[in-house]
Amino acid sequence: MQNGKLIIFSAPSGAGKTTIVQHLLTKIPELEFSISATTRKPRGDEKHGKDYYFISKEEFLHRIARKQFVEFEEVYSGTFYGTLRTEIERIWENGKTVIFDIDVEGGLHLKRKYDGQALAIFVQPPSLEVLKERLTGRGTDSHEKLQERFKKAEKELNYAPQFDIILKNHDLQTACSEAEELVRQFMAHSS
Ligand code: ADP
Ligand code: 5GP
């Protein structure tokens, strides 16, 4: 399939997009997760080829030079993340809809690039304070990394109006149900 659909979940780190995307993947078998490439090291029990393609900076730069990314970004200083063109093609070939968990700028980039085929959803936490609590509570980032993520989050919250939909993530169960409804509607009705 050449022109499948895309569903983009973006938000500042800690808003809950990974949790919501993982929920959708268990509920809607027609969705397949776009595995990004990154130069960061695996966290916890993350696996290469499942959560990310964990590659070296040299390999990442080589792939940029060969124009293999649909979009990429140095999301945090010295740490690159990007979507490989082959990843989207692989999922469309499987006849599935691609679902992304991607940062705000990357999400808007994809929305512009695939205008008409994409649904772009911004996951909004109740407040910056709650977002900081969630990110700290997740317990996966060092003090230094947390400060970097908080700083970026403050800026990213301003991008919400540029998305198709703002999904509030106050109560997780409610947010997951709303996300499921939105995605099912989009998959059923868009051409
Ligand atoms: P992101 O992928 O946007 O960085 P995560 O999905 O990793 O965010 O969520 C960050 C943390 O907040 C996780 O520990 C997750 O369990 C928790 N979380 C997500 N949504 C909620 C919610 N509605 N209420 C309370 N905690 C939440
Ligand atoms: P984390 O290190 O927490 O897994 O991800 C950090 C940020 O990078 C998150 O906001 C995540 O959504 C984003 N991200 C993951 N993959 C990509 C990608 O392929 N491109 C871009 N631009 N951002 C990504």
Image: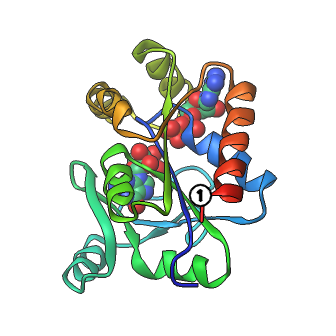
> Is the CB atom of the residue marked by disc 1 within 8 angstroms of ligand 2's nearest atom?
no
At mark 1, the secondary structure is loop
Can the viewer see residue 40 in this picture?
no
2 displayed left or right of 173: left
- On screen, 165 above or below 143? below
Quadrant position of the N terminus in the picture: bottom right
Can the viewer see residue 176 in this picture?
yes
Q: How dense is the environment of label 1, judged by Cα within 10 Å: few (below 14), some, or many (20 and up)?
A: few
> Which residue is at the front of the view, 147 or 182?
182
> Which residue is at the front of the view, 35 or 176?
176
Residue 185 rendering spot, x and y as whole percentages: 69, 48
Identify the image quadrant of residue 128.
Answer: top left
84 displayed left or right of 95: left
Quadrant position of the C terminus in the picture: bottom right
| Residue that appears at 52% across and 84% down | 2
| Residue that appears at 36% across and 28% down | 143
Residue 98 rendering spot, x and y as whole percentages: 58, 65
Which residue carries the number 1 mark? 46
7 displayed left or right of 81: right
The residue type indicated by label 1 comes to: Glu
| Residue that appears at 41% across and 78% down | 85
Tell me how the rendering is colored: rainbow
Identify the image quadrant of residue 47.
Answer: bottom right
Identify the image quadrant of residue 141.
Answer: top left
> Which residue is at the front of the view, 81 or 157?
157
- On screen, 55 above or below 110? below
Residue 5 rendering spot, x and y as whole percentages: 56, 66
Residue 24 rendering spot, x and y as whole percentages: 71, 49
Q: How many marks?
A: 1
